[in-house]
Image (cartoon, coloured by chain):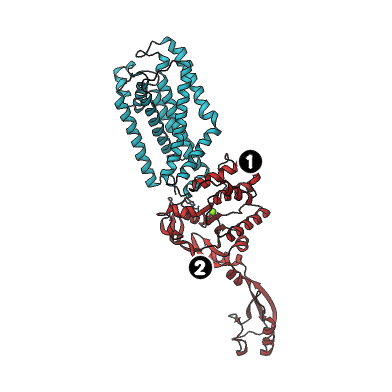
Amino acid sequence: MNWQGVKAIYAFEMERTRRTLMQSIIGPVISTSLYFVVFGAAIGSRIQQVDGISYGAFIVPGLVMLSLLTNSISNASFGIYFPKFTGTIYELLSAPISMFEALLGYVGAAATKSLILGAIILATAGFFVPLQIAHPFLMALFLLLTCISFSLFGFIIGIWANNFEKLQLIPLLIVTPLVFLGGSFYSASMLSPFWQTVTLFNPVLYLISGFRWSFYEISDVSVGVSLAMVLVFLTACLLIVSWIFRTGYHIKK
Amino acid sequence: MQSIVSVRHLSKTYDDGFKALKDINLEIRKGEIIALLGPNGAGKTTLISVICGIVNPSEGEVLVDGNNIITDFRATRSMIGLVPQELTIDSFSTVFAALSFSRGLFGKTPDPAYIESVLKDLSLWDKRNNRIIELSGGMKRRVLIGKALAHQPTVLFLDEPTAGVDVELRKDMWGLVRKLRDSGVTIILTTHYIEEAEEIADRIGIVTKGEILLVEEKDELMRKLGKKQLILDLVEPLTSLPESLLALSLEVSEDGATLTYTYDTQGEHTGITNLMEELRDAGIRFKDMRTTQRSLEDIFVKLVEEA
Ligand SMILES: Nc1ncnc2c1ncn2[C@@H]1O[C@H](COP(=O)(O)OP(=O)(O)O)[C@@H](O)[C@H]1O
Ligand SMILES: [Mg+2]
């Protein structure tokens, strides 16, 4: 194992975040605060409690997931796409480092950043609503698995994309809608039976539901199913990545 | 002489079906400077890229110090440093961080003292805390060299190191390359400047259209170049050379109207005085004379045209 190489990539990626601190950390904090002001305070004050929880508190887990998903994907996809775009990937390809080691560096850094971000958003949320976390360990597990899975997913997108449009395409057209329609701001039980069924096909619903359960012990689907779904997604991403490494898809000519 | 890089029957066909390398065979000797000379599009970068692991070979194999570049990629890539043709470098890192990153990527533990010495050799020490975006083109190229050297490679590839570099910097670059060679690093550089190959290479390989036309000691090539020809237009055509002249390197043209004498400008005696005496004794008279010299340029152009 080339651990020095993994460390070099990890440190480089973390340094990139430090350089773009505004975009990486402060941006999401501001947007989260805006959500609380708009949904939590302005609209939430006119909404009854959801499943016995105030609306402001109810949306916290969904908001965290919203930021985690989009940021894990954008961090990891950009991290590997940018060297391809500028040509600096020559160095990675000519180094005695396996694609798996490179992945550890890129995905590790992206997941770390998302974890930090998740903590910051939770802390921010704490300013607006009283937070209670029923199962801190489970919450941390959901957080961790989500960060890793979606950073992997972002890595895949970054490798697949050969232009900036493609890089934006999946997050914009698929991930964002899935997150918004995955119960970030509502409980699936508020929907008509038809839409409740449709929602069950949205993988993000399971994530948010399980994550919310670790806070308030309320959920749309059982927490075990949620956890299983996260693991399925993680496994799927790992399989795709290993396929990419075997075929050298879009990396080497 | 020990081979450090062996390229055997190497071919590369790109995805679009273009055959960029055709059955390349090349032995690079330990400790030499070899220049791969060829026009744009010849396949120089492709060849280097395959050896360094950036492009997959289609056929054939490459060994670096006896290790296969694919199955033993860790061993081969650890030994190799690459300075790419384009100025591809992360603009936002500082110079020092860029070199440290490269060293780490290649699996070496941090060694700030070594990085410092490399930066000093490259006259970049003053700029160590500058971000790369703030540097001039020449400095960026030196940072790329520094990155390639950061993990102490024993084989260094320089892809067109002086393309678009001014005369002053070019000389510095050559000095640096010699210094590296003297420290034991094997150097492979590509260029399309003949003068550059002449100036620093121990051996020259001529590449065109995906093939290596010849690989020869530079001195050998230069000696061939050093050959001059004296052409004599005769008053009366000759059918054959007289007995007394057979020992000289003389050739009669087909129509017998000219005699061509080949001699070595770098030899101690050109033999021209002797030739004149022999011609007079044989009663051969000439009405005019001229000399020609083949240059590397001529050889190069001729070879490339023939290919
Ligand atoms: N990725 C690629 N796909 C298809 N053709 C390529 C690719 N890269 C290079 N080529 C072609 O291969 C040939 C050799 O290119 P290159 O190795 O860069 O030559 P050189 O370095 O000698 O100028 C050129 O004709 C170039 O157009
Ligand atoms: Mg080239």
Describe residue B226's horizontal placement relative to residue A149 as left or right. right
Describe residue A160's horizontal placement relative to residue B131 as left or right. left
| Above or below, comparing residue B218 to residue A27 in the picture | below
**Residue tagged by mark 1?**
B134
Quarter assignment of residue B223: bottom right
Chain whose colour in the figure is cyan: A
**Residue tagged by mark 2?**
B1
Nearer the camera: disc 1 or disc 2: 2
Q: Dot 2, how many residues are within 10 Å of its Cα: few (below 14), some (14-19), or many (20+)?
A: few
SS at mark 2 in the image: loop
The residue closer to the viewer here, B216 or A100, is: A100
The residue closer to the viewer here, B14 or A38, is: A38
Q: Residue at horizontal 48%, vertical 59%?
A: B210
Residue A24, image x, y percentages? 51, 30
Residue B301, disc:
none
| Above or below, comparing residue A206 to residue B47 in the picture | above
Residue B264, image x, y percentages? 64, 76
SS at mark 1 in the image: helix
Asked whether residue B307 is in view, the answer is no
The residue closer to the viewer here, A21 or B264, is: A21
Q: Residue at horizontal 59%, vertical 69%?
A: B219
Q: Chain of mark 2?
A: B
| Colour in which the image shows chain B | red
Quarter assignment of residue B290: bottom right
Residue A72, image x, y percentages? 44, 32
